[in-house]
Image (tube, rainbow, N blue to C red):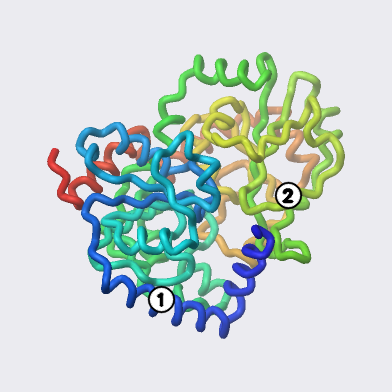
C-alpha cells in the first residue's frame, strides 16, 4: 500500500495535466462539502510529515497544549497513516485520507502541521486558523521559490498557501518564508522552533546520560545526517542515498574511540553504502524516534544541506559539511545562500576525515557566527507559539 501511495504521489507531483485535474476536482469537492459543515470551535487537528510520525514541532506544541489548562476543554486530534501505532500515546486519532479525516480537517478551528494537511489540494475553511510550523530552517529552496527554480508547474504553488502563522528562528528566515509562501510578514513569528526548546536547555549531564543510554560512554560521537536527493530514486520512485563514503577508512583514521551515528532522512527509502553499517563503529539510527536525543549525544555533526545544521548550532559543537555533489545539488534543488562561506565544508572524503580528526580549530568561531545569523531566538518557542495560537482562538488567559 505504501509503495503504491508513494508512486501515485510522485506521478501527481510531476505530471502537469494529472495534477491539474486532481487539484481542481479534489479542491472543488471538498470546498462544496465544507459548506455543509460547521466549524467546531474546540477542535484542533495535528499531523507531522503528512501523518507519518508523532514528532517534530507539532508534537512539542501538542504536548504543551495537552498540559495547559487553557485548552482543557479542547479536542486535540492527530492524523496518522497508521493511527494504531500511536494510540498508547495519543487518545484521539484519525486515519489520513479517510472520510473522517477530511471531515475533521473541514471542521477544525485550528490546523497544526509541519508540512501540509491538504495533500496537494486547497480546501481550508475561512474559520480555520492554519499554523504551519515548518520542519527546518530553509537552506534549500522551498515553496514557490522551489517551483520557480525547477521551472515546473503545480497548481497548489499558484494558489494562496492559506497559512496564518509560521515560526522562524531568525529574521533572515522570516523573510524567506514570507517570500516562499506568499505571506505577510505579520504571519511569521520570529520565536524559534518548539522542538528546539529541548536542545536549547541541554546540559553536559543530559549529554552524558544520553551517551550512556546509547552505550557511547567515552566515545567521540559523530552524527552523520545527510538529506535526500529528489533526483536519485529507484524504479518505484523511492529516494535512494548513495554517498561516496568508505566507513572502514573513517574507522582506520579516527580510531577505536570514535563512533558514527548514521541518520538517513525520512524521505530516503534505500541507502547504498559499503559494509560497516550497523557495526561497532557505525550505528544506523535512521528510525530512532527522537532526533534531538541523537544531537544531544553527539560531539560532532556531519551533514550536507540538511536543516539539522541550524538546530545543532544551538549546542555550539563542531559541525562539518560533506557536500560531495554541491554543483549538482544546487542546480537541481537550489539554495538561498552559499553555506560553504559560513561553515567548514568539503567535497572530498579524505579532507573531511582530516577535518574531523583535527577538530578544525577555527570552526567554533564560524559556528557561533552562523548561529547568531540564522538562529537568533531559541529556548522559549513553544510557549510563544502557543500563546499566539491561544490569542487567535480567543482562549482566556
Residue drawn at x 39%, y 45% is: 169
232 or 365, nearer to the observer: 232
176 or 239, nearer to the observer: 239
Report whether residue 198 is seen: yes
Q: Position of residue 81 (x, y in %)?
A: 54, 53
**Above-or-below relation of 152 to 253:** below
Q: Which mark is residue 140?
A: none
How packed is label 2: few (under 14 Cα within 10 Å), some, or many (20 or more)? some
Q: Position of residue 90 (x, y in %)?
A: 43, 38
Residue drawn at x 60%, y 51% is: 305
Q: Position of residue 257 (x, y in %)?
A: 75, 19
| Image quadrant containing the N terminus | bottom right
**Above-or-below relation of 206 to 40:** above
> Would you say 86 lies left or right of 388 here?
right
How packed is label 1: few (under 14 Cα within 10 Å), some, or many (20 or more)? some
Q: Which residue is mark 1?
A: 27
- Please tell me whether mark 2 sits on a helix, a strand or a loop: loop
- Please tell me whether mark 1 sits on a helix, a strand or a loop: helix
**Above-or-below relation of 382 to 307:** above
Q: Which residue is mark 2?
A: 347
Report whether residue 321 is seen: no
Residue drawn at x 35%, y 49% is: 167
Question: In terms of sequence position, does the residue under pointer 2 or pointer 1 come before the other?
Answer: 1
Amino acid at each position: 500500500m505504501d509503495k503504491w501511495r508513494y508512486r501515485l504521489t510522485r506521478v501527481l507531483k510531476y505530471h502537469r495535466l494529472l495534477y491539474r485535474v486532481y487539484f481542481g476536482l479534489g479542491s472543488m469537492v471538498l470546498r462544496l462539502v465544507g459548506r455543509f459543515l460547521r466549524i467546531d470551535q474546540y477542535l484542533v487537528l495535528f499531523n507531522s510529515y503528512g501523518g507519518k510520525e508523532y514528532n517534530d514541532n507539532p508534537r512539542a506544541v501538542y504536548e504543551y497544549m495537552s498540559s495547559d489548562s487553557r485548552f482543557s476543554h479542547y479536542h486535540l486530534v492527530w492524523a496518522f497513516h497508521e493511527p494504531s501505532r500511536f494510540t498508547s500515546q495519543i487518545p484521539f486519532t484519525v486515519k489520513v485520507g479517510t472520510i473522517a479525516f477530511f471531515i475533521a480537517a473541514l471542521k477544525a478551528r485550528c490546523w497544526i502541521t509541519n508540512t501540509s494537511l491538504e495533500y496537494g489540494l486547497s480546501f481550508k475553511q475561512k474559520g480555520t486558523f492554519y499554523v504551519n510550523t515548518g520542519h527546518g530552517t530553509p537552506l534549500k529552496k522551498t515553496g514557490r521559490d522551489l517551483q520557480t527554480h525547477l521551472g515546473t508547474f503545480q497548481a497548489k504553488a499558484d494558489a494562496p498557501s492559506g497559512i496564518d502563522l509560521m515560526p522562524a528562528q531568525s529574521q533572515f528566515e522570516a523573510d524567506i518564508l514570507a517570500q516562499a509562501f506568499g505571506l505577510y510578514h505579520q504571519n511569521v513569528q520570529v520565536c524559534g522552533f518548539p522542538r528546539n526548546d529541548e536542545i536549547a536547555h541541554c546540559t553536559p549531564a543530559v549529554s552524558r546520560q544520553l551517551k550512556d543510554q546509547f552505550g557511547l560512554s567515552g566515545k567521540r560521537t559523530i552524527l552523520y545526517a545527510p538529506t535526500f536527493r529528489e533526483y536519485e530514486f529507484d524504479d518505484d520512485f523511492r529516494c535512494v542515498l548513495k554517498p561516496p563514503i568508505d566507513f572502514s577508512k573513517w574507522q582506520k583514521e579516527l580510531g577505536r574511540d570514535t563512533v558514527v551515528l548514521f541518520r538517513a532522512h525520512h524521505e530516503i527509502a534505500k541507502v547504498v553504502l559499503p559494509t560497516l553499517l550497523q557495526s561497532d563503529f557505525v550505528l544506523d539510527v535512521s528510525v530512532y524516534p527522537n532526533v534531538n536525543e541523537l544531537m544531544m549525544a553527539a560531539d560532532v555533526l556531519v551533514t550536507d544541506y540538511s536543516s539539522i545544521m541550524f538546530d545543532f548550532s544551538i549546542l555550539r559543537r563542531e559541525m562539518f559539511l560533506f557536500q560531495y555533489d554541491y554543483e549538482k545539488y544546487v542546480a537541481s534543488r537550489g539554495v538561498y545562500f552559499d553555506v560553504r562561506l559560513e561553515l567548514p565544508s568539503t567535497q572530498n572524503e579524505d579532507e573531511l576525515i582530516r577535518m574531523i580528526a583535527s577538530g578544525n580549530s577555527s570552526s567554533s568561531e564560524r559556528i557561533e557566527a552562523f548561529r547568531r545569523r540564522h538562529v537568533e531566538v531559541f529556548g522559549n518557542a513553544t510557549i510563544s507559539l502557543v500563546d499566539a495560537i491561544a490569542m487567535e482562538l480567543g482562549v482566556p488567559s
